[in-house]
Image (cartoon, rainbow, N blue to C red):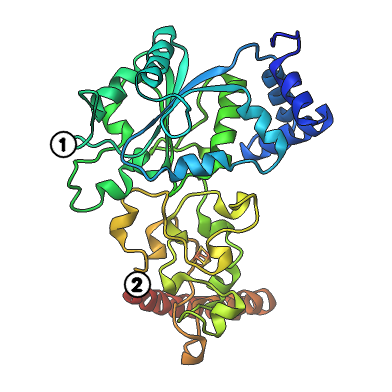
């Protein structure tokens, strides 16, 4: 409860000129972003409105570029999203806090002493004594800071998986938070940088349910990293039709065709970028004509940004079109399969034969695709 008797949310709404109705609408959208049924919107709103104290947060930075901090501070698609951020107390953030030196360290130490706080980590952790602050190594600072924390959130690919600092040959012995913190719940929000909207959604989930959301085996929340980019990509129809960009600026590029041949990692990358987009929902890399670089997956820097992946590596659908140019006159497996199905419906046994032929042809296409990749 704030000093004037209003709840933290009511005060924040009044200060920002947001109606409760708009706040409820935002919470319903938030429920959708968290892959929850829309009725959870009211539950989220009520849980946030019941908060009497802010959640203390310590934000640590190690080997990073501060891009995730930048992304976080710009994560306001709606002003109602700021209300969620008004429910946290950012007690320590090396880049954003006004205090420095001893005063800054006091803020961190006092928060640790009180306990019940959340630790956010940005950047990989060097383990070869490359980063020593006040006589303590990065590893020591991390372990000391998480001591009384309720949970740890690793933001960005560097803290989640090691990122660029860990890329070959990894001269600083960079490691991920999960390599070092073993006795606390850790959630990874990878991305280079993290999408700030996913931080807001994670905080809202934690403030509502008092625990971290369901995760995959890489500690990523399923609501944000549960689906492949390829499966929600607006260029997917072009992939399925075998319409590919071959060169920057060619006809396919101008027409918005699939970027698979330009190295797109969408077929092996789990993220909600096509759904929530970037820059306040205005665009995203594939939308602006650049292939996905797979920045939310481990070791993406070592994969080579423009190297092609094999779509067959992950959850292959029933068929893949051959990845050759349309004018190369190879009949692809998709058209054979569709033809086969139509004929099959019309003439029974004859159709089944056509489908079988189509299947054989499809496998040729797959071999081609595989060879090329
Ligand atoms: S390969 Fe990339 S551009 Fe093509 S459909 Fe998949 S995600 Fe979209």
Q: Is mark 1 within 8 Å of ligand 1?
A: no
Q: Is residue 115 above or below residue 24?
A: above
Residue 330 showing in the rendered view:
yes
Residue in view at x 58 percent, y 80 percent: 254
x, y percent for residue 66: 42, 42
Q: CA distance from mark 1 to mark 2?
A: 37 Å
x, y percent for residue 199: 54, 36
Q: Secondary structure at mark 1?
A: loop
Q: Is residue 64 above or below residue 61?
A: below
In which quarter of the view is residue 110 placed? top left
Residue in view at x 44 percent, y 54 percent: 269
x, y percent for residue 99: 44, 24
Among the two numbered marks 1 and 2 on one chain, the one whose residue lies closer to the N terminus: 1
Residue 37 showing in the rendered view:
no
Looking at the rendered image, the quarter that the C terminus falls into is bottom left
Q: Secondary structure at mark 2?
A: loop
Cβ atoms under marks 1 and 2 closer than 8 Å: no
**Residue situated in front as seen by the camera: 202 or 88:** 88
Category of crowding for the residue at label 1, using alpha-carbon neighbours closer than 10 angstroms: few (below 14), some (14–19), many (at least 20): some
| Residue 313 numbered tag | none
Looking at the rendered image, the quarter that the N terminus falls into is top right
Report whether 13 appears left or right of 106.
Answer: right
x, y percent for residue 133: 25, 27
**Residue situated in front as seen by the camera: 155 or 219:** 155
**Residue situated in front as seen by the camera: 361 or 126:** 126
Residue in view at x 81 percent, y 27 percent: 20
In which quarter of the view is residue 8 placed? top right
| Residue 128 numbered tag | 1
Q: Is residue 74 above or below residue 100?
A: below
| Residue 373 numbered tag | 2
């Amino acid at each position: 409860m704030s000093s004037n008797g209003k709840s933290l949310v009511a005060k924040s709404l009044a200060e920002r000129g947001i109606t409760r109705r708009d706040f409820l609408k935002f919470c319903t959208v938030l429920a959708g972003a968290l892959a929850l049924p829309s009725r959870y919107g009211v539950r989220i709103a009520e849980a946030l409105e019941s908060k009497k104290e802010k959640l203390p947060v310590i934000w640590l930075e190690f080997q990073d570029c501060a891009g995730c901090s930048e992304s976080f501070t710009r994560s306001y698609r709606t002003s109602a999203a700021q209300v969620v951020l008004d429910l946290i107390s950012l007690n320590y953030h090396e880049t954003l806090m006004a205090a420095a030196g001893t005063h800054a360290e006091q803020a961190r130490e006092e928060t640790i002493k009180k306990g019940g706080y959340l630790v956010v980590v940005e950047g990989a952790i060097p383990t070869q004594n490359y980063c020593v602050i006040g006589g303590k190594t990065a590893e020591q600072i991390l372990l000391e800071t998480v001591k009384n924390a309720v949970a740890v959130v690793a933001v960005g690919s560097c803290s989640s998986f090691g990122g660029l600092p860990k890329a070959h040959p990894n001269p600083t012995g960079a490691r991920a938070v999960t390599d070092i913190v073993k006795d606390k719940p850790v959630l990874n929000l990878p991305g280079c940088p993290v999408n700030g909207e996913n931080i807001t959604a994670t905080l809202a989930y934690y403030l509502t349910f008092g625990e971290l959301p369901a995760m995959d085996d890489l500690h990523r929340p399923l609501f944000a990293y549960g689906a492949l980019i390829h499966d929600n990509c607006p260029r997917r129809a072009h992939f399925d039709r075998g319409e590919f960009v071959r060169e920057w600026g060619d006809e396919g590029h101008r027409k918005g065709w699939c970027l698979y041949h330009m190295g797109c990692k969408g077929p092996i990358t789990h993220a909600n970028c096509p759904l929530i987009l970037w820059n306040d929902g205005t665009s995203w890399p594939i939308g602006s004509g650049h292939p996905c670089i797979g920045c939310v997956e481990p070791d993406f820097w070592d994969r080579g940004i423009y190297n092609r992946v094999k779509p067959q590596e992950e959850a292959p659908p029933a068929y893949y079109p051959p990845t050759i140019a349309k004018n190369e006159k190879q009949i692809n497996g998709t058209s054979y399969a569709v033809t086969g199905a139509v004929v099959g419906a019309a003439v029974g046994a004859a159709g089944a034969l056509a489908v079988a032929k189509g299947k054989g042809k499809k496998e040729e296409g797959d071999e081609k695709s595989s060879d090329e990749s």
